[in-house]
Image: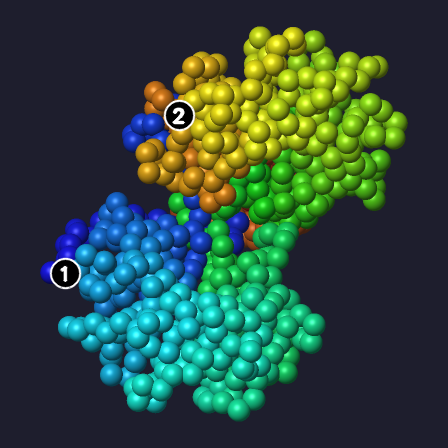
Amino acid sequence: MLVTIAFPLKPLKIKYMKKTFTLLVCLTFGVILKAQDSLWMSFFSHDIWAIENEADTLWIGTSYGLVKYIKPNETYELFTTENSGLPDNNIMYDALKIDSDGNKWIGTYGGIVKFDGNNWTIFDDSNSPLESTIITSIDIDINKNLWFGTASGLYKYNGTNWQVYNMYNSGLHSDYIGDLVCDGNFGIWVGTSLGLTFFNYHNYWQTYDVGNSGISDNDVLSVTLEDDKVWIGTYEGLCCYDKTNWFVYNTDNSMIPSNVIESVEVDENNVKWLATNEGLVRFDGNNWEIFELTNITYPTLFISVDIDVLGTVWAGTLAGGLLEYNGINQVEHFIGTSEFSEYEVTSIVQNQDGSIWMGGPRGVTHFYNGQWFLYNYDNTGTYVGSCRTLKFENNILWVGTDFFGLLSYDGLTWANYNTFNSSLPHNKIRDIEVDDSGVKWIATNAGVATFDGTNWIVYDTLNSGLPDDRIYEIEIDNNGLIWIGTRAGLVSFDGANWTIYNTLNSGLSSDFVYALEIDQMGNKWIGTASHGLNFFDGLNWVVYDSINSSAPNFRSINDIKIDQNNNKWLSCGQLIKFTGQSWEVFTPENSGIIDGNTSSLYVDSFNNKWIGLTNGLSIYNETGVILKTRQIQRDEAHYVLIVPNPAREYFTLKLPDEIKYDNLKIINLQGLTVYKSNLVSKDEKIKISGLSTGIYIVECYTNKGLYTGKMVVR
């Protein structure tokens, strides 16, 4: 019996975020917001694994559910296991198809789903021959039969009966199906983990692998057709088979930027569009063109591509980036919760005003007044991407990056210190601490650097007592002693003397010190690489691991934070709480955390635990999540259109004709008024050439109340 679930259609309705810098202002009133869902809040962007066009609607399969994106009004609806009949939120690559009746067929980790617009019908191992509920691909043949690729073989379904093809009853060499495509001649091309297999209704089977053909790799990621040609994406390049000859395009013999081809589509002009690990690629048979998301500072990992009836190309990436290209213009969208557009959160810090700043591969994200804003190269002119660590010194934000050195931001101006323009010894920075004198202590791949705003000092293995130049963590205790985590032990430095603690001369369980935190009593809590949590009070050592305590089986501990109740929180691929007596592991199955892979931690002034994940952000508080926001006005504000935006020399405000102007203020994100003027006319050009590059709030006071908007100055 089929499982059919009728859900009321009340999906989450969210305005999507695209690459634009005008803002719909979300107002708050200086109150403390308590999450209604109490203990947990989460924000995330979606890995876009599958895209299917249906007239003005784009159906998107993601790692967090099914998205229905309405193109004309630029909104989307999110269907998840919580508000629909989806059995699982993970929708696999190319496992999304629409049949001639408009039914959506969706492949998930929990089986096959048919959605007719009202009812959700689930096929799994309890009501069908499916031996695996991991559905990897879907296609529909000319007789309207449905074909499903799974982790347990190939399945055909005609609406009533099922037929199963696997290694034991057919010519398949592998039961793991990566992709499949039906041709117009009753044939099926099936990409498997052991080659490309062709199958037709005459029960003819032929498998092409590296041993008997010119295919470059047995592990087939994607398959598509162009007339009589078969295009195959693999881990070792793009292959073309014209039924006689094989052609391989890779980084050695072509301009293709990556050999990993996640998805291939062919448009009506026979142009090939490739989703690769280093961009979206257009190939017309002779020329190569590469497209990337412009708001990040590293190659874009595309994983899906589709072309609509107008010829517009839609390409999805890891972490929610969706590129739209109509042949002339490129538009970038982000699919996720709110306007949160980062995927891996590598560092979190709170400023004096209560706002939260987060770093990640895309740049620096600021959560302020209920709004999210991403700082990146496009709106700062500085390489703010690949952020590894954040630290505030009063109101100055210091940013350590993986590739671009040290950055500072004072609310108006970004500055960059790197190996080319300063004495910084290496551009990879893992940690930053600031001592009582305002000196920055910087953990690099070439030792410890200090910077007082003018002068640099570098400590390395050649001129100091450091046992290794690769520095992972720096902490400063209440006595001003500098503690340093390296691959060769724990080091303390008092300004003159260096002391090394390692496995030979102390109770340290591993010389690889990956994380370090100091509690209110001055005790050191030390995270190691796969050798447990260490405690050191200055005299005694205690090691907590799964062998000598009830601690869980640790992976490498990459971050440690201590909350207001003296609980220790560990990030080690999973979230762990240690009270000093008991251990608790938080997973998506037993808590509200949305991803089990943790990458950073922070405890804010409300004792909220901010948990950076490889796929988003979760916030946890045992007494309920509390977010404080700053009052920006007393009455309801209206949105003002700022043109141009971003602005460079001047801007104008676009307001209704009946509005009478009074005065205008420009406020930076630190809350300081940097410009004030009385407006004369609605077409007045406000000169801003004296403002530094950055983001500002524009407030215009009128006879109809306050109009406000966010402006980027470039």
Visible in this render: residue 292?
no
* Residue 1 horizontal side relative to residue 504, left or right: left
For residue 705, what is the image quadrant? Answer: top left
Residue 157's x, y, as percent?
23, 73
- Residue sitting at 17 percent across and 73 percent down? 161
Q: Is residue 634 above or below residue 258?
A: above
| Residue at the image point whose x is 55% and y is 58% from the top | 301
Which amino acid type is marked by label 2?
A: Glu
Q: Amino acid at mark 1?
A: Leu
- Say if 651 sits above or below 307 in the image: above
Which of the 4 image quarters holds residue 123?
A: bottom left
Q: Secondary structure at mark 2?
A: strand
For marks 1 and 2, the one nearer the N-term is 1
Q: Is residue 306 left or right of residue 673?
A: left
Residue placed under numbered mark 2 in the picture: 584
Q: Residue lying furthest bottom in this view? A: 244
Which residue corresponds to the image point at 33% horizontal and 58% vertical from the top-left?
Answer: 134
As displayed, is residue 587 above or below residue 623? below
Viewer-proximal residue, 257 or 158? 158
Q: In the rendered image of this protein, does residue 285 appear above or below residue 424?
A: below
Q: Which residue is mark 1?
A: 2
Quadrant of the rendering where the N terminus is positioned: bottom left
Q: Secondary structure at mark 1?
A: loop
Rendering coords of residue 203 (x, y %): 31, 85
Residue 455 drawn at (x, y percent): 85, 27
* Residue 644 appears in the rendering: yes
Q: Residues within 10 Å of mark 2 (few under 14, many from 20)?
A: few
Binning the other alpha carbons within 10 Å of mark 1 as few (below 14), some (14 to 19) or many (20 upward) gives few
The colour scheme used here is: rainbow
